[in-house]
Image (cartoon, coloured by chain):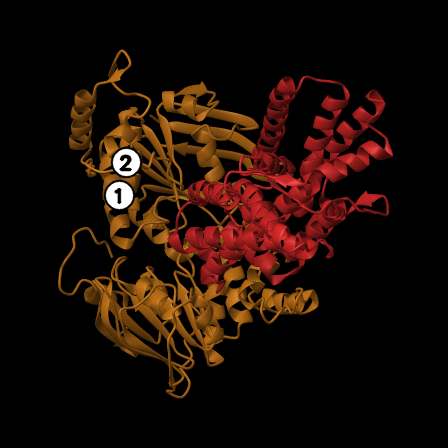
Amino acid sequence: MDLEVRGINKRFGATIALDSVNLKIASGTIHSLIGENGAGKSTLGKILSGVYQLDSGEVELAGQTVTIGSPRDALSRGITIIAQELSLVPSRTAADNVYLGIEDHAGPWVRRGVIKDRFEELTNTSGITVPNDRPVSALSIGDQQKVEILRALARNSEVIVMDEPTARLSVEETAVLKTVMRSLRDQGKTIIFVSHFLGDVLDVSDAITIMRDGKIIRTSKPTEETHDSLVEAMTGRKAGDAFPAKKPPLAPVSVLEVTGLTRGALFSDISFTVGAGEIVALAGLVGSGRSEVARAIYGADPIDSGEVKLQGNTIKISHPATAISNGIAMIPESRKDQGLILDRPIRENIALPYLKKLSSVLMKRRQENSLVSENFQAAGIRALSSEMSVRSLSGGNQQKVLFARSLAGAPTLFIADEPTRGVDVGSKRAIYELMVDLASKGMAVLVISSELDEVVGLAHRVIVMQTGKIVAELVGDQISESAVVAAAFSTKQREGLAS
Amino acid sequence: MTTVDTASKSVNVKSLLSKYAIVWVTILVFIFLSASTDAFLSIDNLRNILDQQSVVLIVAAFTTIVLISGGFDVSLGAIYILAPLVALRVQNNINSAWLTLLAGILVGLITGLLNGVIVAYGKINSFIATLATSFIFFGIAYLVSDGTILRVTDINMRKVATTHILGLTSATWIAFLVIAIAWILLDRTRFGRYIFSVGGNFEAARLAGVRTNRVVVAAFVLAGAGAGLAGTLNSIRSVTAQASDDFSIIFSVIAAVVVGGTSIAGGSGAIWRSVVGVFFIAFIVNGFNLNGVDPVYQRIIQGAVILTAVGADAWSRRDKS
């Protein structure tokens, strides 16, 4: 089913989200929409799937002009959106979710047998398999996404809009999703892929449409584009190097020294050091125990045994508060779930760990303001004022608030878990510069990242983990994407890794 | 708010309307009753309302803090009954006004501590935990009083609650003091920041170094102390207390706090909101009484009004997303 839009305009208050957009999407293709935050790519996807209504313009579906008044309307015309935040009923099984609202029934009774048969048939024909013996809340994010895709297929959708589907997936899960996308395309479905991840976009698309400030810059084939050409078109600026130059670490003084850290089945016998001015990356697959090690050092989770030395002194960290007072800062994996108090102002979010110093009986607002404004600038937060709620900021700026919070403690060890997840291209570069800058000032930096280019681009040393153990340590010229991947998979091969 | 917010310069009329909706509605109710009901706008009547609401205000002040911290405390009704029974036992033995009040507050502190520890360290949902402790506290109330009515033996004791100072009763002044304390705690201290952060995002607060469990315990302890003080004050004023006394104050308090606009989801709210919520409901009830509305219908209408107020608030918030 070919899809065409002509002269679409959409405003939100004073902001023009889409400005006379024309676009053709051919049936049976994977068509990517890319752009920086606010470029209009998600808005376009949401208009096509009925989430938003257009102000003016036309949508043509299989040669006929149509009005898409609601998601339900879009669904009946064969268009489904799979939103970034999945919308499943957590306590029900995959089949229950897939047929929610369209159950086979006899009178008021649901015909469970028929549903089960139909579910099996659907998974067979689509080739998408998910466990159906447990509630979807017990499934991985990747499997939950597959349930949403099956749901779309069960409703005979021809066009599936996927809004940032890989943002919360691990490397392996992303590879599986891409296989699913290709097979759907081969079955004649059209997929509109809205994404920040340019590697995935180049890998999987048949056509790429680049947007900027609500306008379409161009539509091209992935063979005509490179990572840099996409970045250039998205930002309108010449793409510099993605990463700042590595500066050699300072004198080999260990700031952090971890010996024999063990926690049940999650990780065991972890020993490594991070020196002053050094950026060390903890790499490995999701579930290899990288984040768990970092959280244990920070006191967020307990350990069974092992020792943590900071600047030569053994310290026992049983709560993040102890870590902070010992000069450790951490940016957690999920800024929304573990990092920020979204409805509070930027100021309060930055000052939160340091309130003891900033208050006697009452808060010392003047001292607080000066600490905040200093680090607000150092982290390069772009916001009208530090009184704005964090929720109103873009992903990149939210992440910078967490950087500002960490900087405000003048830490000696800085741990960043997925520091650029869900951050746009421009902010990424700023965050990299910040980290390199911190290291050059003598801070020890420990980075955890699923993005290999980040690991390779930033780290002086890479520690690769696999199923809770350190399997390799790469230094200097040994560091390359293939070396990291080889180490991460060294003993057991897993299928479906694209790299 | 003391600092100038750049973003708020563009605040339009609509957001002023919705942010302070409960204030405007309360003022409208006040004006309406002043115009329609002769006896409403008189010093005596308003003074009475303040005096009657003093105990509600005391309980509401710290209940607001518990709600903002993401908790819920239904046991405050039971503490409100239990505390004065212990306090009157103290009064019957040692005839001291201060020790009596102190005993009531102490009972609140201890019961609140129990609630807080169960919720924070036992990781039990606060609604269920405090529902369970309510039964325990009521049981203890019967034990303390032997199932009898306890009386204040010295009638002079009433002065603690009924002395007129600058035209208002001492109970009213105590309520004002408690509100001021809660307000300052929430708005001007480190503890207040912790309350908002724990209620807004518990895990994020913990990872930012906030001793989250201690904060939760402290919120329940304060709420218990407030309920203990309010219950004791109320019983001294009425000179008697028994285990089967009316504990429905907790419903009025939660209704007032929620009508005021503090979210039961935690992370947002304000003391002034609860104060306005208390008066909104108090004015309506007073209006009904002055106009001789049957108490049975009063309750039905009161419930409908609370639903409308909370519903309108939820509806206006939905726009923002």
Given the current orientation, which residue lies at the most extreme top position? A107
Mark 2, chain letter?
Answer: A
Local secondary structure at mark 1: loop
Mark 1, chain letter?
Answer: A
**Rendered shade, chain B:** red
Given the current orientation, which residue lies at the most extreme bottom position? A251
Local secondary structure at mark 2: helix
Residue at which label 2 appears? A147
Q: Are marks 2 and 1 in contact (CB under 8 Å)?
A: yes
Kindly identify the residue that appears in the image at 66 percent across and 64 percent down.
A363
Instruction: Please determine whether, in this image, residue A493 is positioned above or below residue B268.
Output: below
- Judge from the rendering whether residue A174 lies leftward or rightward of residue A252; answer left or right: left
User: Residue B262, how many percent across, how many down?
Assistant: 60, 41
Q: Nearer the viewer, residue A145 or A48?
A: A145
Three-letter residue code for mark 2: Val
Q: Which mark is residue A139?
A: 1
Instruction: Please determine whether, in this image, residue B253 is positioned above or below residue A427.
Output: above
**Rendered shade, chain A:** orange
User: Residue A207, how many percent across, how many down?
Assistant: 35, 41
- Judge from the rendering whether residue A114 lies leftward or rightward of residue A48; answer left or right: left
Three-letter residue code for mark 1: Leu
Q: Is residue A11 visible?
A: no
Q: Around disc 2, counting alpha carbons within 10 Å, would you say few (fewer than 14), some (14 to 19), or many (20 or more)? A: many
Q: Nearer the viewer, residue B62 or A474?
A: B62
Q: Nearer the viewer, residue B100 or B62?
A: B100
Q: Nearer the viewer, residue A84 or A344?
A: A344
Quadrant of the rendered image containing residue B117? bottom left
Quadrant of the rendered image containing residue A108? top left
Q: Earlier in the sequence, mark 2 or mark 1?
A: 1
- Judge from the rendering whether residue B39 lies leftward or rightward of residue A220; answer left or right: right
Q: Around disc 1, counting alpha carbons within 10 Å, would you say few (fewer than 14), some (14 to 19), or many (20 or more)? A: some
Instruction: Please determine whether, in this image, residue B87 is positioned above or below residue B148.
Output: below
